Amino acid sequence: MRPGQAPGAARFLIPADGMIRFLRRLSFALAALLILTVGVVSLVGPAHFPRLMGLLRQGAGTGLTVGGPFALLDAASGKPFTQDNLRGHWTLLYFGYTFCPDICPTDLAKAVQVLTSLGPDGAAITPVFITVDPARDTPSVMDRYVALFSPRLVGLTGSQTAIDQAESDFRVFAEKQPVPNGGSGAYLMNHSAFFYLMNPQGEAAAILPPQLDATGMVAAIRRAIGKAATS
């Protein structure tokens, strides 16, 4: 104990070299956090970041401002699929693309798991997968892809103009990301990854953020369906 030091205070002293190491680690951690934050904003694009954060803030409830008139193509039947096809039943919408290396297949598998866990409620919900990459996701490609997950999963594609309209309706961000050393024309798609639960009136009943696991999605969907039943 140093002269004049209060009893018991010695155990709180940090050696100078230890303090320096601590401050270095803290600075590295803060730098990493800053890089991560900048990376996220860069990924979705500065102009789109506030729009996506708006979706996160909306969460679940009535009057969610997404959806609108669109005209796409059902990959399996070749028939038109518009906003009118969302009416009369619950729908779980997701935007992605078949060449996605990890996130999209993981999310689609999660959606199938969620609908199974919901039992009869899940059986009444139509899962729909809309491509953000219509140049590669032709009807035949989409049809084969969705069949890998569930015979109930509806795959939608269309012209780039039609896809752009649907993305605008649902505030989806999507852009091409060239693959370094991937060859001529090689690219991935940066895109937002929300699930949209649409009620039988074709309105958004809940917007489910990407970080929700299957258990969280089940709970959110049950709340939305229960709220609609009692309203």
Image (cartoon, rainbow, N blue to C red):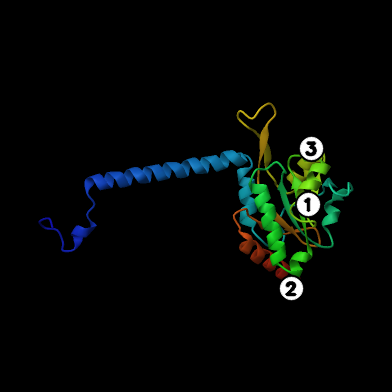
**Numbered mark located on residue 138 in the image:** none
What separation in Å lies between label 3 and label 1 (alpha carbons)? 23 Å
Image height check: is 129 above or below 219?
A: above
* Mark positioned earlier in the residue sequence (3 or 2): 3
Left or right for 200, reference 41: right
User: Which residue occupies 18% across, 58% down?
Assistant: 10
What residue is shown with label 3? Answer: 160
Residue at the top extreme? Answer: 184
State the image quarter where residue 196 is shown: bottom right
User: Which residue occupies 82% across, 62% down?
Assistant: 89
- Graded by Cα atoms within 10 Å as few (under 14), some (14 to 19) or many (20 or more), the crowding at tag 1 reads some
Question: Is there any visible trace of residue 29 in the rendered image?
Answer: yes
Question: Residue 155: horizontal and vertical position, in percent?
Answer: 79, 49
Given residues 203 and 187, the one toward you in this image is 187
What is the tally of numbered marks visible in this picture?
A: 3
Q: In what quadrant of the picture does the N terminus appear?
A: bottom left
What separation in Å lies between label 3 and label 2 (alpha carbons)? 40 Å
Residue at the bottom extreme? Answer: 230
* Mark positioned earlier in the residue sequence (1 or 2): 1
What's the amino acid at mark 3?
Gln
What's the amino acid at mark 1?
Ala
Q: Of discs 1 and 2, which sits in the foreground?
A: 1
- Graded by Cα atoms within 10 Å as few (under 14), some (14 to 19) or many (20 or more), the crowding at tag 2 reads few
What residue is shown with label 1? Answer: 147
User: Secondary structure under badge 3?
Assistant: helix
User: Secondary structure under badge 1?
Assistant: helix
Question: Is there any visible trace of residue 176 in the rendered image?
Answer: no
Question: Residue 160: horizontal and vertical position, in percent?
Answer: 79, 37
* Mark positioned earlier in the residue sequence (3 or 1): 1
